[in-house]
């Protein structure tokens, strides 16, 4: 039986340590992992818990991230609670198996510490890896700070393992700005945390020899489409389970989570849609702007990236006073508008107010994103609002050296 | 459901053409494409003969692929020495053998690859390939004589 860990009411943890503690408390059966910067301390921490008797489950060291996720798929199909962690290039190597995990409906939890993708090689945080996996059929949750990097993995097990869901869940946090930043974290005691996560209930487990099953069957044009449709419906329907797990967690801890977090949106004239650790920077800037110039700035932060909260994003944007919105994409867009811009725009298109929406690429490869930058961008939104149309390029790059970089124009509102 | 002593199980072998199963909608396909081997639960499957197992409709045992074959192996009991070579080598478990005695060929699953004929050590061979349309008795009537050793 695993030893209990003595925890203070308030601990000083970075995001990595917070996530590794959450994984420890979930009493996972198998962790198969291959460490990579900046998520290494999650795997390292978990390995230390195993070595020191704080974990009962198996810890499998594998030869690559492809093997790590493959090991997770095998262990989950066998009937165990399973989790791992990765970043960037490791995540990219996992991608093939990510689709297997979701198609096989295996509720694996993957903590992703977001980092840029090479080339050029870079270990700093941006959302390239998060964007790479966004269509892999996983539930995607985003932690903005260490506390959330602790809370969300606990909830991820509950959500993914729910019998109406049975889907794998990723919990993202920003490389370094969250993963290596020590902050106050209020953890649950071991027995409280485990009681919240609950005992794992296996489904179609291969170790049930009285009911032999085939996992990973091949289907061609006569069956594949029906299976993918069923899988998509489970992902879309997981919204209500996510909401109910968030509500239960609030009851237990007082900490409230929503699929779309919004700050000062009640009377906002201009708004920024942003993910990750940049959310706190943006909120701070918005508060200062309201005090300094009276500009009513609001911030929208999708907590749940998949299933994309189309309903709640639309609800948040559908306000008469809201004139201009900027969507911040921290991933090289590869010849398109940013993904967040595209998805938010699609939701906004069905609102009555139809605010002006523009796109910024920012923070690639860990380029710092500071309060002054938010202020500059929000003043630009105010200019769009006053002019009644977009006064800049629709897509721009923020914080990059060299001549101003932007694409596409319109005189329409 | 117990699987032992089910007289109807053999009758389920190859009852449908592969791919001819009912095409249900997305709401009725099994979650995660998880396919059960048997109807109900079972224990000691390894000790139950295939003809006594309650295979599910997802199991290839209940499907036939006989239509894929253009040539077939025919088995001659009079020459066979029950060495089990063909049983070991058959890639589709289509040689039926019980208590180390050859019984014949599962024509629902045999694809006519001819491996069994290739590995048969008797002289003449106890398995030979014939056209799919040829009657087995007719084939047996044309069986070759023992070949003399060449000096």
Image: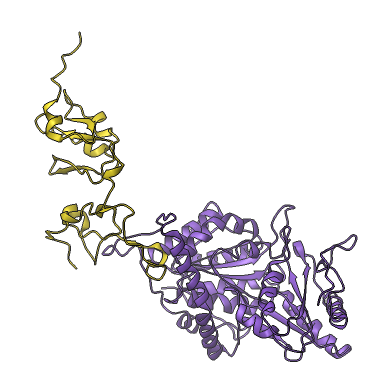
Chain colours: A purple, B yellow
Residue A343 visible from this viewpoint: yes
Height in image: A46 above or below A288? Answer: above
At x 39%, y 56%, the residue is A217
Q: Quadrant of residue B130?
A: top left
> Residue B52 location in percent, x, y?
16, 56
In this rendering, position of residue A360 left or right of residue A249: right
Residue A183 visible from this viewpoint: no
Height in image: B111 above or below B24? Answer: above
In this rendering, position of residue A319 left or right of residue B81: right
Pick out the residue farthest to the left: B78
**Quadrant in the picture for the N terminus of chain A:** bottom left
Between residues A72 and A181, which one lies in front from this camera angle?
A72
Q: Quadrant of residue A46?
A: bottom right
> Residue A120 location in percent, x, y?
75, 52
Height in image: A116 above or below A16? Answer: above
> Residue B7 location in percent, x, y?
11, 59
Q: Quadrant of residue A375?
A: bottom right
Between residues A16 and A288, which one lies in front from this camera angle?
A288
**Numbered-mark total:** 0
> Residue A137 location in percent, x, y?
53, 66
């Amino acid at each position: 039986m695993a030893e209990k860990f003595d925890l203070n009411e308030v601990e000083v943890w970075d995001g990595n340590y917070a996530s590794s503690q959450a994984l420890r408390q979930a009493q996972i059966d198998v962790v198969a992992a291959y460490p990579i910067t900046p998520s290494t301390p999650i795997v390292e921490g978990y390995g230390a818990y195993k070595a020191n008797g704080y974990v009962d489950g198996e810890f499998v060291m594998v030869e690559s991230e492809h093997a790590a996720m493959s090991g997770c798929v095998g262990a989950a199909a066998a009937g165990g609670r399973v989790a791992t962690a990765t970043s960037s290039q490791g995540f990219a190597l996992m991608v093939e198996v990510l689709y297997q995990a979701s198609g096989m409906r295996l509720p694996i939890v993957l903590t992703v510490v977001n980092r840029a993708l090479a080339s050029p090689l870079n270990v700093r945080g941006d959302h390239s890896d998060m964007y790479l996996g966004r269509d892999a059929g996983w539930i995607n949750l985003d932690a903005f700070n260490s506390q959330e990097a602790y809370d969300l993995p606990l909830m991820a097990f509950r959500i993914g393992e729910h019998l109406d869901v049975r889907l794998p869940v990723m919990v993202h946090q920003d490389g370094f700005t969250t993963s290596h930043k020590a902050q106050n974290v209020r953890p649950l005691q071991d027995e409280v945390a485990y009681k919240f996560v609950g005992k794992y209930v296996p489904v179609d487990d291969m170790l049930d020899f009285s009911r032999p099953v085939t996992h990973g069957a091949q289907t061609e044009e006569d069956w594949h489409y029906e299976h993918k449709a069923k899988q998509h419906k489970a992902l879309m329907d997981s919204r209500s389970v996510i909401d109910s797990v968030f509500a239960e967690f609030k009851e237990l801890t007082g900490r409230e989570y929503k699929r779309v977090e919004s700050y000062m949106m009640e009377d906002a004239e201009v708004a920024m849609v942003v993910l990750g650790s940049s959310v706190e920077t943006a909120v701070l800037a918005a508060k200062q702007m309201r005090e300094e110039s009276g500009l009513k700035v609001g911030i929208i932060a999708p907590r749940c990236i998949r299933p994309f909260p189309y309903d709640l994003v639309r609800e948040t944007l559908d306000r008469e006073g809201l004139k201009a919105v900027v969507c911040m994409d921290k991933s090289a867009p590869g010849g398109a508008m940013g993904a967040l811009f595209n998805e938010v725009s699609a939701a906004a298109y069905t609102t009555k107010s139809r605010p002006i929406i523009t796109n910024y690429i920012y923070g690639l490869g860990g380029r710092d994103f500071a309060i002054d930058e938010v202020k500059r961008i929000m003043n630009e939104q105010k200019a769009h609002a006053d002019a009644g149309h977009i006064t800049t390029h629709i897509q721009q790059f923020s914080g990059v050296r060299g001549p101003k970089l932007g694409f596409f124009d319109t005189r329409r509102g | 459901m117990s699987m032992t002593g089910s007289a109807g199980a053999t009758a389920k072998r190859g009852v449908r053409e592969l791919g001819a199963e009912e095409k249900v909608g997305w709401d009725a396909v099994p979650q995660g494409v998880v396919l059960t081997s048997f109807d109900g639960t079972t224990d000691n499957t390894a000790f139950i003969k295939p003809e006594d197992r309650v295979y599910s409709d997802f199991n290839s045992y209940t499907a036939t692929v006989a239509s894929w074959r253009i040539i077939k192996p025919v088995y001659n009991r009079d020459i066979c020495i029950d060495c089990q070579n063909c049983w070991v080598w058959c890639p589709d478990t289509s040689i039926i053998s019980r208590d180390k005695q050859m019984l014949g060929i599962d024509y629902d699953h045999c694809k006519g690859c001819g491996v069994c004929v290739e590995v048969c050590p008797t002289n003449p061979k106890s398995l030979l390939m014939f056209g799919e349309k040829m009657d087995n008795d007719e084939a047996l009537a044309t069986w070759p004589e023992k070949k003399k050793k060449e000096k």
